[in-house]
Amino acid sequence: MKNLLLFFLIFSKSILFGQTILNSFPLNLNNPLENGQILNVEDVKTHDVYAFATDDKNITILKYNKSLFLTNQFTDSIRIAENRTLMGHSLSEDGNPTLYWGSDNLKNIKIIKYYLDTKNSKTLNFDFPQNDDYIISTFQKNNSFYVLAKEKREQHLLLYEFKNGNCEIKMFDFSGFNFQNEKGQNFTLSTLIKYYPIHKMESNDFNPLDKTTSINKMYVLEDRIILTLDYSAKKTQVFDLNMETLVVTEKNFNQPVSKKASQNSNSFYSENQLFQVKANKDEFLFDLKDFDSGKTLKSISFSKNDTIRFKNSPFFLQTSNNKPQELKTTSKFLSHLSDLSVGVSVLKNKKNNFITFGGYVEYVAFSIDYGQNDFFNDGNGQSQYTRTKTVSFDAVLNPDLEFVNQQSEPLAIDNIFYFLSITKNVSLENILKLKDYSILGYYDLVSKQFIMRKFTDGFIREGNGNPIMNKAQFSKPFRFEKS
């Protein structure tokens, strides 16, 4: 996983929530912590599940049917793709997977299709055009593999679609749109994303504040890509990219107006709604807008002297990997938040929206070593290291767009990260979200097995239906990033 951990503040003793081992497979990976990668994926048409596990020598492919029974396996050498990163996958109509192995500079991809029944493979070579500046993001959709890239000095984005051994290039033209800061100065799309890269948000999954506080975000829908740009404190500029027609549509959503000037604002897109936040040390503002009409559906604000009755958790403060602290007052929360990049994360589960409001910053700290050992410093007795700071609180918004103050049972994603936080010997973890549950696939360093566990929402319950741990023993999870 990419620097993500979800930690539970649990007051009871060790209890595992809603999880069942589905299967395990003996697998001896060579130096997995240095060379290993694992991907768990679903065929969206047949609902077969694949696991791709690799080290610096071999790739092992496991294919399971929709009931999670192993139906095929294949181990092949990765000599052709040696010293490359597994970027993604696609699944052909014949049921055979294709993996995409990127070079260090991401200018070349080795495309290898694996034939599970005949136990052989076929390799293609793909070079990105020389005028491609860099790759913005990669993603999978409908069994295809996509690369979104930026071309040098051009005001357009290129989308590479890899499917059934072919690559189709699609262009989204931004030359007719204006980008202007609050001082009225014009700049280009190239300039914007050079200094503020676009970060892809995960659909139907929790996105931590270290991702959602980025000002440029990307959301992949069924046949569209949504880009939200929050470089201005006055508005959110949105571009809707149609992947079929290649039409780019611009929308602008005014940010809520604060009493005191504030440059700290952001947004998050979810389920055809735009969640906008703005904050300073004296107040916090939140708007919920309909994406199609731009109409404001809900608007709230609170000041440093207010009591926030709709929050569904305490105010939390965490620095780096230290134990989270509870902030007692709204004033302290806003004071800490004013020094951070503000953000909001939304996860819709069934009918309710689970929302995390807060902020995040990553910074370089320095320390002075007065001792004799200067191995880790710069030669002048000074060493540097990266630290992070996060403040947040949770809320729940029901279908009537009312905040409900209720103690919620854990979601499957909560259960997964609580399991990870208390379990040793887990590496190369990968989460696959299916319709009714989630699968955690990982490599066990001690037993040398690839293991898949099923996680569901809620607590484990006894035979009489009562939860093993009642709600009074359960504290709302606090999500933080682990470096």
Image: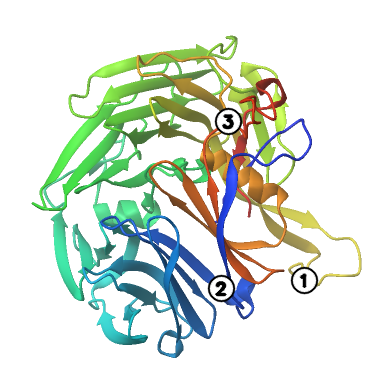
Give x and y (percent) for residue 292. 18, 28
For disc 2, the marked residue is: 36
Q: In this view, does 243 lie to the left or right of 227?
A: left
Q: In the image, what residue occupies the spot 26% across and 28% down?
A: 253
In the image, 199 versus 156, the foreground residue is 199
Q: Residue 392 carries which label?
A: 3
Q: In the image, what residue occupies the spot 21% across and 76% down?
A: 165
Question: Would residue 234 be visible to someone looking at this image?
Answer: no
Residue 348, image quadrant: top left
Q: In the image, what residue occupies the spot 23% across and 47% down?
A: 222
* Element marked by disc 2: loop
Front of the two marks 1 and 3: 3
Label 1 close to label 2 by CB (< 8 Å): no
Q: Quadrant of the N terminus?
A: bottom right
Q: Which colour scheme is used?
A: rainbow
In primary-sequence order, the first of circles 1 and 3 is 1
Give x and y (percent) for residue 421. 68, 48
Cα distance in 3D space between marks 2 and 3: 33 Å
Q: Is residue 123 left or right of residue 32?
A: left
Mark 1, other Cα within 10 Å: few <14 / some 14–19 / many ≥20: few
Q: In the image, what residue occupies the spot 39% across and 69% down?
A: 87
Cα distance in 3D space between marks 1 and 3: 38 Å
Is the residue 472 above or below the residue 232 in the image?
above
Front of the two marks 1 and 2: 2
Question: Would residue 122 be visible to someone looking at this image?
Answer: yes
Q: Which amino acid does label 2 sit on?
A: Gly
Q: What residue type is labelled 3?
A: Ser
For disc 1, the marked residue is: 379
Q: Which residue lies furthest to the bottom in this view?
A: 79
In primary-sequence order, the first of circles 2 and 3 is 2
